[in-house]
Amino acid sequence: MHVPHLLQQRFIDALKDFTDRPEQYASMIRGTSDPKHGDYQANCAMPLAKQSKDGKNPREIAAMLVAKLELDDICEPPEIAGPGFINLKLRDRFLTDSLANMLGDDRCGVAQVETDKPIVIDFSSPNVAKPMHVGHIRSTVIGDSLARTLRFLGYPVVTDNHLGDWGTQFGIIIYGYKHFGDPDVVESNPVTELAKLYRIVNQLVEYRKASKSLPKLKQTIEDARQVVTEAKDTVEQAEDKQLKKAKKTLAAAERRLAGAETGLASAEEKILKVEQDSDLGPKAIAHANIDTEVLEETAKLHRGDPENISLWNRFLPHCKDEINRIYARLDIHFDHTLGESFYHPMLADVTAKLEQLGLASDSDGALCVFLPEFDAPMIIRKQDGAYLYATTDLATLEYRLTEFNPSEILYVVDTRQSEHFEKLFAVADHFGLSEVKLVHVNFGTVLGEDGRPMKTRSGTLIGLESLLNDAVDRAKQVVCNPERLVNFDPPMDAEEQDNIAEAVGIGAIKFADLSHHRTSDYRFNLDKMVALDGNTSAYVQYSYARMQKILQNANASDDDVAALVREHGVEFTHIAERNLVLQLIRFEEALNTVHKDYAPNHLVDYLLETAKAYSRFNDNCHVLKAESKSIRATRLAIVFHCKQTLGKGLNLLGIDVVPRM
């Protein structure tokens, strides 16, 4: 049920005498934040008054509009407030009838859209030659939640994990295997050994890059120091009118200097770490050109070198097995897993088409697309003949349009790639691929408690599996501590404890991530995430378990509750009952907002508000000790539907419920 849509239709009928755009003004209906203003509020009278030819003020317009509205079956008589707000309070009978009608509906009253045009969602997309890390969590859980929600709303959804299975990371592994790998050891334990080889080569490559960058970094610092000196002189000589501007210039120069010094310190730390390592130090000397040789191994793979192709075919299944194990634990599934390698045979045709259309031209040996709205071009083929992400993304887009014929394609990729997608979408428009809605569903960064990107002491991003293990361990300490366990009857055995800890721990990470608007950075704090109170998944999961317990104690099945409602009806006797039912019928509104903004945090907010409304209901409205059978029937119906809605909402976030905790 989407109450604003229902109200909007009634307003459209009434607004036809006021404007030739009734839909536009009818859309100005919002839920109220303060119950004293009703449940919903229409704000259309003010803009209508501005267009009034006879000079009527907003309150007069509102009064005329209210006189034409036919809302008696839905709302109490509308009230006009302030400069012309129309306050709408739903009738209790409308709410109780809605609750009765939703009982037994596994869709929780949510209507399905009617469309056969799919929405393609591109998310997660790790490089498969290395372990998944904390940086992958956001794309993975945001994309999964959007896929679940849009499917539930009725959209045909196609999920595609665009794996990085063809890039430099495989050049790194191939080089590592050829120079440092033991075939027997790799064969016996491929996942661990390939990850180890990747780390070794990557550290050596970063060492070479850092070593080569030192002269430029030092020169940058010298130049920055000179600019700071000059800026200080300007401040000292500045007159009052110019002093503020001079100080701002000095502050900016000092920030640039600090950034350059940090960059140099980081490079020197990488160099020192390798040179002082008894294993890496000699390797760095013996493999002085490792950075360029890794690129050559990648180029050989792309040219179809038989040895490298054979190694790629041998290693890829093991790499996929590793990430699939993480996906299984996260309960993440994809319709397609079409990596970069799938599109490689299509890239030559893409570049040829760009040239034929006059979109691509040579620039110092590279093939580029120049667009007037961007300073830098989109490079689609480098001087050495290698293709880039942009080329693959164009081939991917062309394939998806042909294969799936979607209405929308969502790219759930972090904000740092914004310019890439702006260029991609612009080129797609010129390329003749603009008939589909393309959306970059961008997101921020997971930060440590120090406000910096989460990394290990060695400076590498924290492994995702390690993060999940920590969350599950912490959850077990909280929800399965001895003081809580003594209260369970029957006792909770070890297997049930492990299952609950897994559901709460994994749920905590997903919920915390999804609770922030996707464009925001957020600080990772496990203690807060797994708490049983506060804005956490554990709080919502615990609310669900409490409802389950009430229904078990009442010995009331789904059919029993429906039968009680048919016999006794539904009638409110406490404001907490009404407030909770009002919250429950807003489920569809929350889901539609998720789609509108491509932001699951709206669903998280809804679930938290629903759990809080249930807590107030639970504190004030006894269910099992209700004063009468009719009151008991109403409250059991509320508990049953609330449990169903919370369970469905958590499922759409990819979070499991547990029967007790």
Image (cartoon, rainbow, N blue to C red):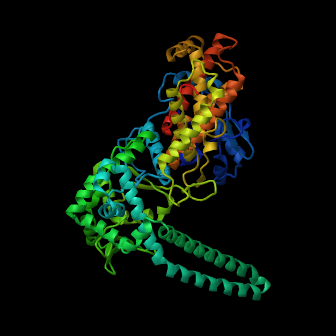
Please indicate, yes or no, whether residue 438 appears anywhere in the rendered image.
Answer: yes
Label count reads 0
Q: What percent of the width, then of the height, locates residue 293?
A: 33, 71
In the figure, is residue 20 to the left or right of 159?
Answer: right
* Image location of residue 630, percent across then percent down: 64, 13
Between 348 and 117, the one nearer to me in the picture: 348
In front: 374, or 200?
A: 200
- The residue depicted at 65 percent of the width and 53 percent of the height is 53
Q: Residue at x 48, y 73 (%)?
A: 210
**Quick one: which residue is furthest to the left in this view?**
306
Residue 180 at x, y percent in the picture? 34, 62
Give 577 or 208, whichever is nearer the viewer. 208
Residue 428 located left or right of residue 565: left
Position of residue 518 relative to residue 107, above or below, is below
Indicate left or right for 37 with 333 as reference: right
Above/below status of 306 relative to 121: below
Give residue 405's position: percent from left, percent from top.
32, 49
Answer with the quarter of the image where residue 575 lies: top right
Observer-nearest residue: 60 or 271?
271
Q: Is residue 8 depicted above or below 492 in this figure?
A: below
**Considering only vertical position in the picture, is 235 above or below 385?**
below
Give the residue furthest to the front: 278
